[in-house]
């Protein structure tokens, strides 16, 4: 009979699968126009890069599945939000229930770095973890294959900037040359997992957390995964 098999496939009740964990995390990728958000996601998810620039309209989605360890699967639902959206009303809707974020700037255009703090403030004002703390956010200094301008030339100053502004870290990345994108994603996932454990240990919130995860997971399987990022 099949009931046993069915239980094994999806439920944490079956003993053989009791150790297996699956997480679905919503991650935002934000920052000024043309900084390389879509390119970073395409590189990360599809191992692909194009010089051709086509501005994202509104929001796009991609799903990255990580075999984190032998019994943990992590699905990252990446929300690729258009650079122009900070001036729109939609970010509050897009940011909802996100558990991590990347803010991207272009190392060759200082203006995109100057705007980082506005993105960070917008993010912190509009989304928090269930315990009210800020979601972990990593700053990506993208296009590091290009000539760098401004404080990104000084790693010490960047460290200080990130501490001051509440970033969980920063990486120089290049979607073009495939530099540091995997590393940045791993670092963000580590922070998210840590927060997840802390929240799980807080037993009064356990019920809420399950509901949130479950809701996102359902949304993903119906919409996000198949819409992908249009590439
Ligand atoms: P919006 O959707 O308008 O907000 O832009 P975006 O942040 O998604 O930028 P996108 O990924 O579309 O990239 C903009 C341009 O920068 C494209 O022409 C890309 O080819 C180029 N680009 C992206 N990443 C890199 C990089 O690491 N190095 C170089 N040299 N060019 C890059
Ligand atoms: Mg884009």
Image (cartoon, rainbow, N blue to C red):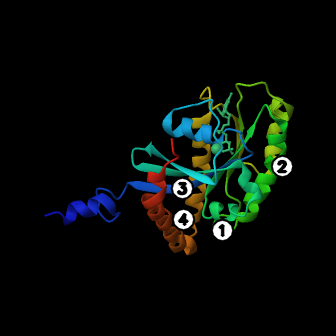
Which mark is nearer the camera, 4 or 2?
A: 2
Which image quadrant for residue 171?
top right
Q: Position of residue 39 (x, y in %)?
A: 61, 37
Cα distance in 3D space between marks 1 and 3 = 16 Å
Q: Ligand 1 falls in which quarter?
A: top right
Identify the secondary structure beneath mark 3. strand
Question: Of tags 2 and 3, which is closer to the observer?
Answer: 3
Q: Nearer the viewer, mark 4 or mark 1?
A: 1
Q: Quadrant of the N terminus?
A: bottom left
Which residue in the structure is indicated by mark 4? 200
Out of 118 and 3, give the one closest to the viewer: 118
Q: Which residue is mark 1?
A: 131
Left or right: where 38 falls relative to 7: right
Q: Which of the two discs, 2 and 3, labels the residue nearer the N terminus?
A: 3
Check disc 4: other Cα within 10 Å, few if <14, some if 14-19, many if 20+.
some
Dot 4: element = helix
Q: Residue at x 77, y 53 (%)?
A: 120
Residue 56: x and y in percent read 63, 47
- Tell which tag, 1 or 3, sits nearer the viewer: 3
Which residue lies under the disc numbered 3? Answer: 25
């Amino acid at each position: 009979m099949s009931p046993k098999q069915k239980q094994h496939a999806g439920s944490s009740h079956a003993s053989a699968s009791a150790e297996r964990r699956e997480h679905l995390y919503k991650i935002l990728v934000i920052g000024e126009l043309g900084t390389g958000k879509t390119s970073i996601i395409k590189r990360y998810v599809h191992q692909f890069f194009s010089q051709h620039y086509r501005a994202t309209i509104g929001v796009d989605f991609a799903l990255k599945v990580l075999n984190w360890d032998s019994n943990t699967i992590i699905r990252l639902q990446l929300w690729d939000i258009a650079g122009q959206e900070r001036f729109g009303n939609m970010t509050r809707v897009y940011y909802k229930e996100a558990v991590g974020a990347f803010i991207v700037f272009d190392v060759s255009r200082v203006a995109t770095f100057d705007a980082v703090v506005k993105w960070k403030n917008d993010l912190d004002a509009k989304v928090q973890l269930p315990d009210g703390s800020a979601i972990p956010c990593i700053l990506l200094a993208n296009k590091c294959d290009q000539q760098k301008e401004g404080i990104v030339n000084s790693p010490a100053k960047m460290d200080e900037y990130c501490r001051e502004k509440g970033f969980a870290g920063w990486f120089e990345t290049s979607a073009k040359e495939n530099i540091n994108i995997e590393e940045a994603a791993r670092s963000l996932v580590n922070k998210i997992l840590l927060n997840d454990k802390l929240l799980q240990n807080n037993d009064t919130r356990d019920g809420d957390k399950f509901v949130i995860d479950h809701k996102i997971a359902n949304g993903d399987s119906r919409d996000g995964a198949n819409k992908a990022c249009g590439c």
